[in-house]
């Protein structure tokens, strides 16, 4: 086993522990953002027709400004900071931004189209302390809709497998190509490299989605089965996305603007990349009153929203407030099952530890003990 593989495995163990700390902190308090996206540059080296998150002329945001925004997010208690764009690898001081995020103890993640990755660049990301990188791949060959193609990026994936010490996720996308089967081919290739995989669904310019056709639904189910039902396979139990695939609205309370923040290149806080303009307050002025207000604000775009990172942080609060009901929603039982939910084994164990029957006082005391020990071990502040 190579040194890189050993380091990657050690990093994975530490990364999962830190993810658990993020969840524990979020379960203990809802007064801080869980995830924030920052945009250090709006320019992109590609021009995918379906994307509304780039231009071809913007200059990089001044490094000092971005670092101040990272510091402000730390002051607000943000657990995870994701760098996106545009294409963030075009920013000349990306490594300094990552280092600043890590210095605050936050998880640093990067969303890139992958085109600018080289062995040397990957090693720099290792040294900067990057925790997680995601590339979305839309098809097998470039076309007029998307340039993010496996035939172009396969060499980049080989380099990531050989040199990356951080975690890598390949998001295969359904809806950008007339060949939905391409998404399954992308996911299989990612698994060959040992990367995590997720499946995304292309949305319109307001983050909304219509129902998928029969072929797209079949491909979606095929991709879900690649990893099977497990604790770490969010796509498998993402009931939000499963409903959207069928054209069904989701009933949920979006936490954007509170538990999730999107900070554009101008330093303004928005609900997400698809709802820019609200609330539109400068991050430097954004405080606890704003977080509390947006925690309770109803977003009319929520029923057919496809922004999965907002779904994920909201799921934590759903579970925090309504644990048993949330388990049934996240892991609905199959028609031939008597159990209230069909959760992975680790979830059932955790439910036994932390969700005692209402009538059992002894189990309640045991649960309190489990909770205190767990929070202490995870150093949830």
Image: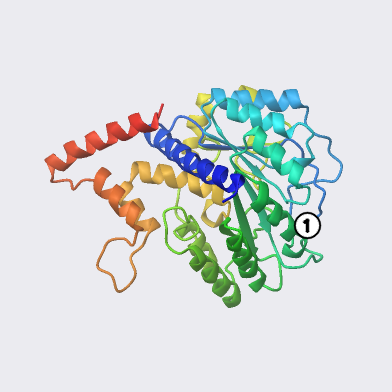
14 relative to 179 in the view: left or right: left
Q: Residue at x 35, y 58 (%)?
A: 343
Q: Is residue 287 left or right of residue 50?
A: left
Residue 47: x and y in percent read 81, 54
Q: How many marks?
A: 1
Position of residue 183 measured from the top left corner of the image (x, y, whole percent): 64, 67
Which residue is under mark 1? 48
| Left or right placement of residue 144 versus residue 227 in this view | right
Q: Is residue 302 left or right of residue 58?
A: left
Residue 353, percent from left and from top: 25, 45
Which residue is painted at 71% across and 66% down in the image? 139
Q: 150 and 318: which one is in front? A: 150
Residue 281 seen by the camera: no
Residue 365, located in which quarter of the rendered image? top left
Regarding residue 3, the answer to whether it shows in the image is yes
Q: Which one is in front, 327 or 370?
A: 370
| Relative depth, front residue between 146 and 18 | 18
225 vs 312: above or below? below
Identify which residue is drawn at 49% across, 48% down: 312
């Amino acid at each position: 086993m190579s040194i890189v593989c050993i380091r990657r495995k050690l990093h994975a163990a530490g990364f999962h522990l830190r993810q658990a700390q993020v969840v524990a902190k979020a379960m203990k308090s809802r007064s801080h953002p869980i995830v924030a996206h920052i945009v250090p540059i709006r320019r992109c080296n590609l021009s995918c027709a379906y994307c509304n998150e780039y231009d071809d002329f913007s200059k990089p945001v001044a490094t000092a400004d971005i670092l101040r925004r990272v510091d402000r997010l730390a002051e607000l208690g943000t657990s995870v900071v994701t760098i996106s764009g545009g294409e963030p690898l075009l920013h000349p001081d990306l490594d300094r931004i990552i280092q600043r995020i890590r210095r605050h103890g936050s998880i640093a993640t990067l969303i890139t189209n992958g085109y600018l990755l080289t062995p040397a660049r990957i090693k720099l990301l290792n040294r900067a302390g990057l925790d997680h990188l995601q590339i979305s791949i839309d098809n097998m060959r470039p076309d007029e809709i998307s340039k993010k193609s496996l035939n172009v990026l396969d060499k980049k994936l080989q380099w990531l497998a050989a040199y990356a010490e951080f975690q890598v996720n390949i998001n295969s996308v359904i809806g950008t190509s007339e060949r939905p089967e391409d998404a399954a081919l992308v996911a299989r290739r990612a698994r060959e490299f040992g990367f995590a995989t997720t499946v995304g669904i292309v949305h319109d310019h307001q983050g909304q989605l219509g129902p998928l056709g029969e072929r797209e639904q079949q491909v979606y189910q095929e991709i879900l089965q690649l990893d099977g039902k497990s604790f770490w396979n969010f796509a498998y139990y993402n009931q939000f996305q499963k409903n959207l695939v069928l054209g069904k609205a989701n009933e949920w309370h979006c936490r954007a603007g509170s538990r999730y923040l999107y900070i554009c290149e101008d330093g303004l806080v928005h609900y997400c990349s698809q709802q820019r303009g609200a609330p539109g307050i400068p991050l430097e002025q954004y405080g606890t009153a704003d977080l509390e207000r947006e925690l309770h604000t109803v977003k009319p775009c929520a029923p057919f929203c496809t922004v999965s990172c907002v779904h994920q942080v909201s799921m934590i609060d759903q579970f925090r407030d309504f644990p048993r009901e949330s388990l049934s929603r996240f892991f609905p039982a199959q028609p031939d099952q008597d159990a209230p939910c069909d959760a992975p084994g680790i979830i059932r164990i955790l439910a036994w530890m932390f969700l005692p029957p209402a009538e059992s006082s002894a189990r309640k005391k045991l649960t309190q003990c489990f909770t205190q020990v767990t929070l202490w071990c995870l150093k949830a502040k």
